[in-house]
Image (cartoon, coloured by chain):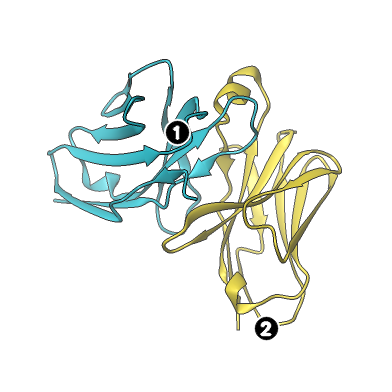
Chain colours: A cyan, B yellow
Amino acid sequence: DQQVKQNSPSLSVQEGRISILNCDYTNSMFDYFLWYKKYPAEGPTFLISISSIKDKNEDGRFTVFLNKSAKHLSLHIVPSQPGDSAVYFCAGTQGGSEKLVFGKGTKLTVNP
Amino acid sequence: DAGITQSPRHKVTETGTPVTLRCHQTENHRYMYWYRQDPGHGLRLIHYSYGVKDTDKGEVSDGYSVSRSKTEDFLLTLESATSSQTSVYFCAIRSGTTNQAATNEQFFGPGTRLTVL
């Protein structure tokens, strides 16, 4: 049972345009969501997070939106830059749990 | 940088041999995790530790064991490696501070690429 789903394995956008990465979840007990970014041959790095009591969190060029009724979240990158090319993982977690549950990732390519 | 190192960074071994991967952290974090990353599967939790000698299983623990005799070291052992265990292995930590406990934000090491022939 896949609790966190990233249905698009890859996404390609032009530099300067918006990148939208999507994530769906099935576990209604999740109360916190995180996005990680991973470059080849490196470990994932934390990017941005959102609590389930919010519907939006913004950090510079990165904004995460949460739609609890649809069990859907999205990461917006505006404007996209070539350095944003990486694999992005969505993760959910439940308060009191020590675990993160990750999606399979979406590979973003930003073309100059 | 959460002061996490993994060793070795690359290893090639043969089926049936034992393999131990080491994760070392320098900042006295309580929680440590082992994940594997495979194409089409994302990051999957193997085992985790919530203190010295306190460990628990994750999603894909079969064929793996762990030990944590010191706060700074978390070892992952493949008792008899199989080709299906060819993967990239990541260690992660979570400090257990109030904010991180609420968010479960984890910091990852650089990874170990293991190939089992």
Q: What amino acid type should be assigned to the residue bearing mark 1?
A: Leu
Q: What amino acid type should be assigned to the residue bearing mark 2?
A: Glu
Dot 1 corresponds to which residue?
A34
Image quadrant in which you'd find residue B81? bottom right
For the point 61% across and 70% down, which residue is it?
B85
Image quadrant in which you'd find residue A52? top left
Q: Marks 2 and 1, Cα distance to the nearest angstrom?
A: 37 Å
Measured as percent of width and height from the top left, residue A56 is found at 32, 20
Q: Which is in the foreground here, disc 2 or disc 1?
A: 1
Measured as percent of width and height from the top left, residue A25 is found at 41, 38
Q: Is residue A24 left or right of residue B9?
A: left
Return the chain for callout 1.
A
Q: Which mark is residue B14?
A: 2
Give the secondary structure at mark 2. loop
Up/down of B67 relative to A37, above or below:
below
Q: Is residue A48 left or right of residue B108?
A: left
Measured as percent of width and height from the top left, residue B97 is found at 66, 22
Q: Is residue A93 left or right of residue A8?
A: right
The answer to whether mark 2 and mark 1 are in CB contact below 8 A is: no
Specify the farthest residue to the top: A53
Viewer-proximal residue, A85 or B56? B56
Return the chain for callout 2.
B
For the point 72% across and 57% down, which residue is it?
B22
Same subunit, tags 2 and 1: no
For the point 76% across and 55% down, which residue is it?
B75
